[in-house]
Image (cartoon, grey):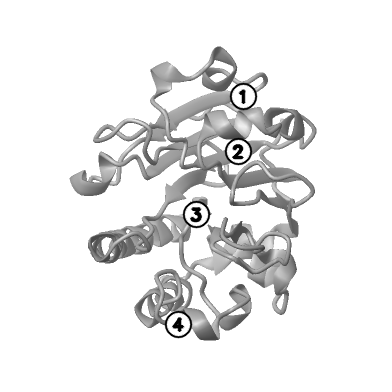
């Protein structure tokens, strides 16, 4: 099996103090996708810059320290690293990182993605819509790579709950960022028109609360499991068909998000 794990850390240094490294060491993950690193690479401890057993790559925000940022850790050294979407507004925020692995079948790529949240202000919601508009053609282009033989998985915090079963209080959130009709329609296009597969939902079509990956820090959201499923692994069809099991880890809390772990029956592990 080939195991891919994704987690929004809400600050790598904070997650480190909460036990994330010890848990990760027991997961036998092949690829780890991280979002909201919230640090510059030079500020990280050596154990974060070079985690044991992994090749580590970062794309930190350049426009503001301690903001956003994504990372990819992998057991096998990649042949290519792409650190930008070529959209300056969002590249400076550190929201996209891609690694490519070679294979006889045409290749295999993993992307760590942090789609903006629009909840803090109307201006940020507008930025989120601009990101969606800019990224959709890229999703279509990536899908074309899959048709040429390269399997791809995009892991990360998409900041959108797609369907009513993807959050607890869907009725009261229909006018809130993360569950707006425009956002949900965009995600439907990503899946139905661009051809991406929501791997967790493919495996568990009717799962509800066990699939939540984010909980507000307000009230008793975590204790009562009043959550949202906004962290995804979206894969090309061939790779999605190789997924065998998925889980969200909730026994410990490293962040306001929880890790999403998916195992693929994939032939690229040494």
Closer to us: 205 or 211: 211
Q: Which residue is mark 3?
A: 157
Q: Is residue 193 visible?
A: no
Left or right: 87 in relation to 94: left
Left or right: 88 in relation to 196: left
Q: CA distance from mark 3 to mark 4?
A: 19 Å
Left or right: 63 in relation to 147: left
Give how far across and how far down residue 102 sits, in percent: 52, 36
Instruction: First in sequence, mark 2 or 4: give its number.
Output: 2
Closer to us: 100 or 211: 211
Left or right: 137 in relation to 76: left
Instruction: First in sequence, mark 3 or 4: give its number.
Output: 3
Q: Which mark is residue 113?
A: none
SS at mark 2?
Answer: strand
User: Which residue occupies 59% across, 50% down?
Assistant: 256
User: Which residue occupies 48% across, 73% down?
Assistant: 191
- Contact, CB < 8 Å: mark 1 with mark 3? no
Q: CA distance from mark 2 to mark 4?
A: 32 Å
Q: Is residue 120 visible?
A: yes
- Contact, CB < 8 Å: mark 2 with mark 1? yes
Q: CA distance from mark 2 to mark 1?
A: 9 Å
Instruction: First in sequence, mark 2 or 1: give its number.
Output: 2
Q: Which residue is mark 2?
A: 32
Q: Nearer the viewer, mark 2 or mark 3?
A: 3
Q: Which residue is mark 4?
A: 174
How many numbered dots are placed on residues in this image? Answer: 4
Q: Which residue is mark 1?
A: 54
Q: Nearer the viewer, mark 1 or mark 3?
A: 3
Q: Nearer the viewer, mark 1 or mark 4?
A: 4
Instruction: First in sequence, mark 1 or 3: give its number.
Output: 1
């Amino acid at each position: 099996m080939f195991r891919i794990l994704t987690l929004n850390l809400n600050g790598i240094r904070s997650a480190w103090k909460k036990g994330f490294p010890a848990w990760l060491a027991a997961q036998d993950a092949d690829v780890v996708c991280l979002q909201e690193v919230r640090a510059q690479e030079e500020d990280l401890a050596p154990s974060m810059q070079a985690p044991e057993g992994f090749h580590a790559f970062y794309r930190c925000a350049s426009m503001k320290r301690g903001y956003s940022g994504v990372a990819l850790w992998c057991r096998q050294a990649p042949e290519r690293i792409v650190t930008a979407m070529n959209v300056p507004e969002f590249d400076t925020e550190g929201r996209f990182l891609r690694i490519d692995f070679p294979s006889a079948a045409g290749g295999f790529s993993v992307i760590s993605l942090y789609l903006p949240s629009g909840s803090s202000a109307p201006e940020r919601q507008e930025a989120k819509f601009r990101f969606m508009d800019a990224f959709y053609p890229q999703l279509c282009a990536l899908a074309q790579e899959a048709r040429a033989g390269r399997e791809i998985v995009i892991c990360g915090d998409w900041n959108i709950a797609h369907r009513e079963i993807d959050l607890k209080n869907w009725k009261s959130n229909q006018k809130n960022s993360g569950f707006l009709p425009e956002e949900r329609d965009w995600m439907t296009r990503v899946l139905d028109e661009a051809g991406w597969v929501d791997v967790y939902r493919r495996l568990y079509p009717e799962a509800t609360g066990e699939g939540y990956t984010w909980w507000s820090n307000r009230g008793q959201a975590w204790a009562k499991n009043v959550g949202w499923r906004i962290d995804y692994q979206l894969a090309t069809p061939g790779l999605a068909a190789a997924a065998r099991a998925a889980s969200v880890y909730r026994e410990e809390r490293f962040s306001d998000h929880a890790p999403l772990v998916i195992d693929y029956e994939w032939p690229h592990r040494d």
